[in-house]
Image (cartoon, helix red, strand yellow):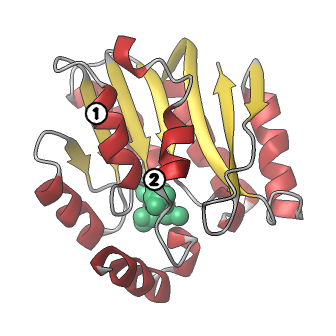
Amino acid sequence: MRDRAKFLAAFAKRPFDTGSITPSSAWLAQAMVEGMELPDADTVVELGPGTGVFTRVIEGQLRPEARFLCFEINRDMAKALSDRFPGVQVVNDSVEHLDRHLQAAGRKSVDSAISGLPWAAFSPERQATLLDATVNALRPGGRFATFAYSHAAWMPPGRRFRELLDSRFSCVETSAVVWRNVPPAFVYRCRK
Ligand SMILES: C[S@@+](CC[C@H](N)C(=O)[O-])C[C@H]1O[C@@H](n2cnc3c(N)ncnc32)[C@H](O)[C@@H]1O
């Protein structure tokens, strides 16, 4: 309940960054990590973790020596995440500066990137800037997962984002719809 309140407050302040009035469900979190090969990964990033629904599931699949960085632009959420997940490196900065933080962490590239960013709420330029920062950080063959709300995926910003994915990745697949998420959503699973 506190997480829902936190989300609502964030949405009221920054609707285009927050993109949703409620956190994702545990069912969507499970679909997000499927096929991401997390138990074999050395370096994993999460983009826009919010209150940490995906963070918990990702952390649970990683080896203790894997490096896990979460990029959260909202200061209050970043602080709450750090308190909740002391073993995770929470970066209170935008995804477009991913490369800088990766270098500071002594890592050259990322094996898997899992995104909760509200792509359909972004302008075309912002979609491209944030996706390019992510793709540039991924190693060849690296994996990327993100979700889209089913009702929004076929609207112009959602369709534009799908085209962007097709132009940046060698393989883009979609999961079945997670009907138990509110609203229903599906996952894009991509390989560089
Ligand atoms: C739709 S919420 C998703 C939160 C969580 N992953 C979930 O599914 O419940 C999007 C999150 O992305 C964050 N965000 C938006 N733009 C960002 C950026 N450029 N860099 C890092 N985080 C960003 C927002 O602050 C918000 O917490």
Residue type marked 1 = Gly
Q: Which mark is residue 26?
A: 2
Instruction: Tell me the quarter of the image containing the N terminus.
Output: bottom left
Crowding around mark 2 (Cα neighbors within 10 Å: few <14, some 14 to 19, many 20+) is some
Residue at (28, 35) in percent of width and height: 59
Q: Which residue position holds label 1? A: 60
Left or right placement of residue 153 versus residue 175 in this view: right
Residue at (11, 59) in percent of width and height: 83
Residue at (49, 59) in percent of width and height: 25
Instruction: Tell me the quarter of the image containing the C terminus.
Output: top right
Number of callouts? 2
Give the vertical position of 31 relative to 160 (above or below).
above
Residue 145 visible to the viewer: yes
Q: Position of residue 133 (x, y in %)?
A: 53, 37
Left or right placement of residue 63 versus residue 119 in this view: left
Q: Position of residue 110 (x, y in %)?
A: 42, 22
Left or right placement of residue 87 versus residue 129 in this view: left
Residue at (39, 86) in percent of width and height: 9
Residue type marked 2 = Ala
Q: Pointers 1 and 2 in contact (CB under 8 A)?
A: no
Q: Nearer the viewer, residue 123 or 20?
A: 20
Reading the chain from its start, which is encountered first: label 1 or label 2?
2
Residue farthest front in this picture? 180
Give the vertical position of 95 relative to 106 (above or below).
below
Q: Nearer the viewer, residue 182 or 86?
A: 182
Q: Secondary structure at mark 1?
A: helix
Q: Which mark is residue 37?
A: none
Q: Nearer the viewer, residue 2 or 121?
A: 2
Q: Position of residue 95 (x, y in %)?
A: 44, 47
Crowding around mark 1 (Cα neighbors within 10 Å: few <14, some 14 to 19, many 20+) is few
Give the vertical position of 60 relative to 153 (above or below).
above
Q: Position of residue 23 (x, y in %)?
A: 46, 67
